[in-house]
Image (cartoon, grey):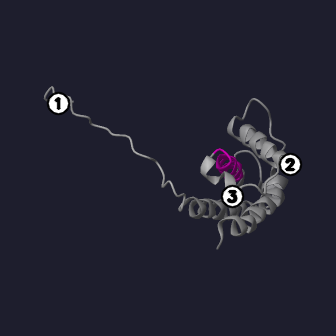
Amino acid sequence: MSGGGKERRFTPRQRRNPSGSHDRENLMRELEAIRRRVQSVAATSRDAFHDGSDAYDIASMVVIRLAALFERTEFAAYLTAVTREERLAINTTRNIAAHTGYRSMNDDLFWAAVTQRVPQILERLIEADGAVGGS
């Protein structure tokens, strides 16, 4: 502060619209971004998918971003199409991808998760979103 006054320099304000009107749009935008990453990984060969490859790094971002959605309370009503077991698997995979070194990733399972399981989950979320949020 300058001048010795007691003026407030920062006033916190609410982070999001209380009506949640943008939550559905933001979620759909993020799901589409994740889907594009999945498509990028699936366009490569399994032989080219290994730690250090671009596809591996993109796959890591897929699970990190997908797991992050479940941490956002404003998206909770839109994410009910994912089972508890799937959430646990997504979080476990995210932890392995984000904290390499404490456990090694099974590249075959990681490839299958990102190219087969995640697209199925994304489709269910997008379909369920229409029922919950209306189109």
For the residues marked 2 and 1, what is the alpha-carbon distance in whole angstroms?
58 Å
Residue at 83% from the left image edge and 57% from the top image edge? 117
Is residue 16 rendered to the left or right of residue 129?
left
* Comes first in the chain, label 2 or label 1: 1
Whether label 2 touches label 3, CB < 8 Å: no
In the rendered image, the residue lying farthest to the bottom is: 135
Q: Residue at x 54, y 57 (%)?
A: 20
Give the Cα separation between the discs numbered 3 and 1. 47 Å
Q: Which residue is mark 2?
A: 109
Residue type at mark 2? Answer: Leu
- Residue 65 belongs to magenta span: yes
Disc number for residue 2: 1
Q: Position of residue 67 (x, y in %)?
A: 69, 47
Label 3 sits on residue: 78
Q: Could you tell me if residue 107 is visible in this image?
A: no
Range of magenta residues: 57-71
State the CA–CA distance, disc 2 to disc 3: 27 Å
Side (left or right) of 97 relative to 106 = left
